[in-house]
Each structure stands twice: as C-alpha cells, then as structure tokens.
C-alpha cells in the first residue's frame, strides 16, 4: 500500500503557544548582541510596559483564538508564515536570504559549466515540486521498535 506524502502530518504534535513573557524574554535575549546597553535597557523597559498592557492581553487572546481555528489542519504559524514571508514581494534582507551550497560535481565535465549545472538543479527542483504535488513521495517513517523481517512480511500480508 502506497501512503500519500502528507499522510502522517495530522498526527504530528502542534506547536505550543508561547506566553507573552516568554516571547519577550526571547526577543530581549536575541536583541542583546545587536544593540547598545542603553538601547537594550530602553527595550527592556518597553517590554515591561507592554507585558502588563491591554494590547498584550489582546494579542495573546487573538493568537489563541487563531490557533483554535486552524488547529484541525495545521500549525497556528503556518498561514502567518506563508503570508508574511513567502507571499511578500519585497527584497529580502540579508539575514533572511536562504543559501544553498553544493559541492562541485566532478563526475561529468558538462555539469561543471555554470549554465548546465543551474539547469540541472532547476530541473531537479521542478521534478521534486511536481512529485510533492502529486503525493508521489512516500512519507518518512521512523520505527521505534525493532521488527524482524519475517514479522514485517507477515504484518504486510495480513
């Protein structure tokens, strides 16, 4: 029996919704190497003011409400991420631009040429995209217990 690519997606655990306090602690932690001590103190003061504000409670309530609406099919972040990151057409700042690095393919001299290699990578990416859309890629299955080959054949046959 062939399983669709996204067969196990619904059984994955959902991301927990972080508290406002946890989110602000992470924000300040990651902000600290990027700003001066004076700016960090100012950001900490603003975060302390925000955490007790009505806006913080409203934002948390909206996030929880949104998570309940989408929980049956996907993570609460999926649509937000798709809309804010993938759908935007503004130039990406350097810190969010993905990079792929490949080793030189020495098996074929033709693939060492830049245009041929770009065409090969584009073809492979398009083929993967089509296979994913057609659910032709089997889902990854990680077994948590050892199964002997004879019992596996018995389970499949029955």
Image (tube, helix red, strand yellow):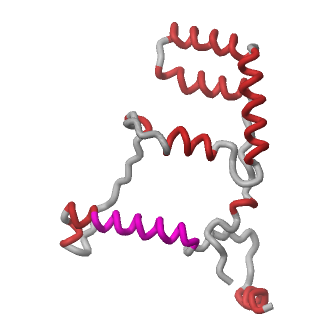
Within the image, what quadrant is residue 55 found in? top right
Residue at position x 62%, y 45% from top? 79
Residue 132 position within the rendered picture, expressed as x and y whole percent measured from the top left: 53, 67
State the residue in front, 9 or 24.
9
Q: Is residue 81 left or right of residue 73?
A: left
Residue 116 position within the rendered picture, expressed as x and y whole percent measured from the top left: 23, 67
Residue 126 position within the rendered picture, expressed as x and y whole percent measured from the top left: 41, 66
Q: Is residue 136 left or right of residue 1?
A: left
Within the image, what quadrant is residue 66 found in? top right
Depicted 72 relative to depicted 54: above or below: below
Numbered label tally: 0
Q: In the rendered structure, does residue 131 fall within the stretch colored magenta?
A: yes
Depicted 104 relative to depicted 81: above or below: below
Within the image, what quadrant is residue 25 found in? top right
Residue 130 position within the rendered picture, expressed as x and y whole percent measured from the top left: 47, 69
Depicted 56 relative to depicted 66: above or below: above
Magenta part mainly helix, strand or loop?
helix
Residue at position x 51%, y 10% from top? 39
Quadrant of the image containing the N terminus: bottom right
Residue stretch in magenta: 119-135
Residue at position x 74%, y 87% from top? 156
State the residue in front, 91 or 46.
91
Quadrant of the image containing the C terminus: bottom right
Q: Is residue 48 left or right of residue 99?
A: right
State the residue in front, 43 or 52.
52
Q: In the rendered structure, does residue 126 fall within the stretch colored magenta?
A: yes
Q: Is residue 137 left or right of residue 154?
A: left
């Amino acid at each position: 029996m062939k399983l669709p690519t996204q067969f196990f997606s619904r059984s994955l655990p959902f991301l927990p919704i972080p508290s406002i306090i946890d989110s602000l602690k992470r924000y300040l932690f990651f902000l600290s190497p990027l700003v001066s001590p004076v700016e960090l103190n100012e950001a900490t003061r603003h975060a302390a003011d925000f955490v007790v504000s009505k806006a913080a409670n409203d934002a948390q309530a909206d996030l929880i409400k949104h998570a309940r609406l989408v929980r049956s099919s996907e993570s609460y972040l999926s649509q937000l991420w798709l809309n804010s990151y993938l759908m935007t057409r503004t130039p990406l700042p350097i810190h969010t631009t993905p990079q792929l690095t490949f080793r030189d393919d020495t098996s074929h001299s033709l693939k060492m040429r830049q245009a041929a290699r770009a065409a090969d990578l584009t073809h492979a990416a398009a083929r993967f995209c089509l296979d994913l859309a057609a659910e032709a890629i089997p889902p990854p299955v990680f077994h948590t217990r050892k199964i002997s080959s004879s019992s596996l054949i018995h389970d499949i046959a029955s």
